[in-house]
Image (cartoon, rainbow, N blue to C red):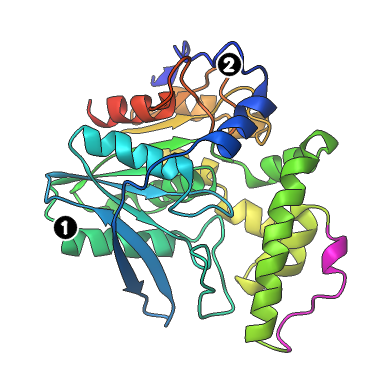
Amino acid sequence: MPLIQDSSYRAPSWLPGGHVQTIYPALFRRVARATKRPDRLELPDGDFLDLEWAEQGRPRLAILSHGLEASLKTGYIQGMAAALIRRGWDVLVWNFRGCGGEPNRLLRMYHSGATGDLHAVISHALANHPAKSIDLIGFSLGGNLTLKYLGERPTELSPRLHRAVAFSVPCDLACSSRQLALPSNRIYMDRFLREMRAKLRAKNLMFPGQLDLTGLDRIRSFQEFDDRFTAPIHGFRDAEDYWARNSCRQFLPHITLPTLLVNAANDPFLGDGCHPREEAAASGFFHFESPATGGHVGFMSPGARGEYASETRAAEFLGA
């Protein structure tokens, strides 16, 4: 019954509310680059993924997946990498298609259910790193990818895969999209859409005539954006079909690897459908923890200038 009822995490008292706990770390955290060696993974479809390694041939490797419109350079990725390196892990981080500052080669980009790309990264690690155990960590969209991957192919997982941790995951994509469309979340929606529009304009230059950008600047929600672009580009009927087929919540009961999901109760991105208590209560492998505070990919440690509580918690669970 791995439903963790009492989380020990509490946000710093001077950081009140889910919005501040989300925004402050994103704006003000500075983390030294922990991963050093670049690696370009060529994919069978002619595209590529950019990776970075921190490697010393250690017996444990962690693969980290970032969130929407982030990258392998993002603070929470590099902070987690540094925390694990200090404890004896090697680390592999990666950029989703088009998230490394260079457009990917195809019209398709990344999306919330593109587990084929995660599988390619894992397969690359299995073939090129001697680790006896490999752990997966995902944040937000990268957490949805991680959990969906573990649940959609449980009988095909490598025996070298050991454990997984995910933070701030929109387990129900329709629920999260509705939540982010609320007026109180306009600051986040505007930022995401601004960056996503820019990528579409770049794609339009690469593939003239294949995208209709009419009214692009008038789009104000993920419902509109995913209906117009994400769904048709990636083979889904519409936004609802895309969300329904790629939400990781439906895959959680099939997970057979010890896995921890930490979603803060005050996460402004997540509605109640993104808190899978029932699945955890019924599972022998899937653990769900919901601290009262933390925001979205926040989890700043009270009084700490270095390691965040999410990093301590991940290392604790993976090392169990």
Q: Residue at x 39, y 38 (%)?
A: 79
Q: Dividing the picture into quarters, in which one does residue 271 lie? A: top right
Type of amino acid at the residue the image marks with label 1: His
Query: Mark 1 falls on what kind of element?
Result: loop
The magenta segment is 209-219
Disc sitting over residue 87 in the figure: none
Residue 255 visible to the viewer: no
Q: What is the quadrant of the C terminus in the image?
A: top left
Q: Position of residue 292 (x, y in %)?
A: 58, 16
Is residue 217 on the magenta stretch? yes
Mostly what secondary structure, the magenta segment? Answer: loop
Asked if residue 165 lies left or right of residue 204, the reply is: left
Asked if residue 125 lies left or right of residue 69, the reply is: left
Q: Residue at x 55, y 33 (%)?
A: 25
Seen in the picture, residue 290 relative to 165 is either above or below; the reply is above
Residue corresponding to mark 1? 129
Seen in the picture, residue 29 relative to 223 is either above or below; the reply is above
Instruction: Assess whether mark 1 and mark 2 are in contact (beta carbons under 8 angstroms).
Output: no
Type of amino acid at the residue the image marks with label 2: Ala
Seen in the picture, residue 145 relative to 203 is either above or below; the reply is above
Residue 13 visible to the viewer: yes
Residue corresponding to mark 2? 292
Q: Residue at x 73, y 56 (%)?
A: 193
Pick the residue in front: 90 or 173: 90
- Between the residue at mark 2 and the residue at mark 1, the CA separation in whole angstroms equals 38 Å
Q: Position of residue 250 (x, y in %)?
A: 53, 43
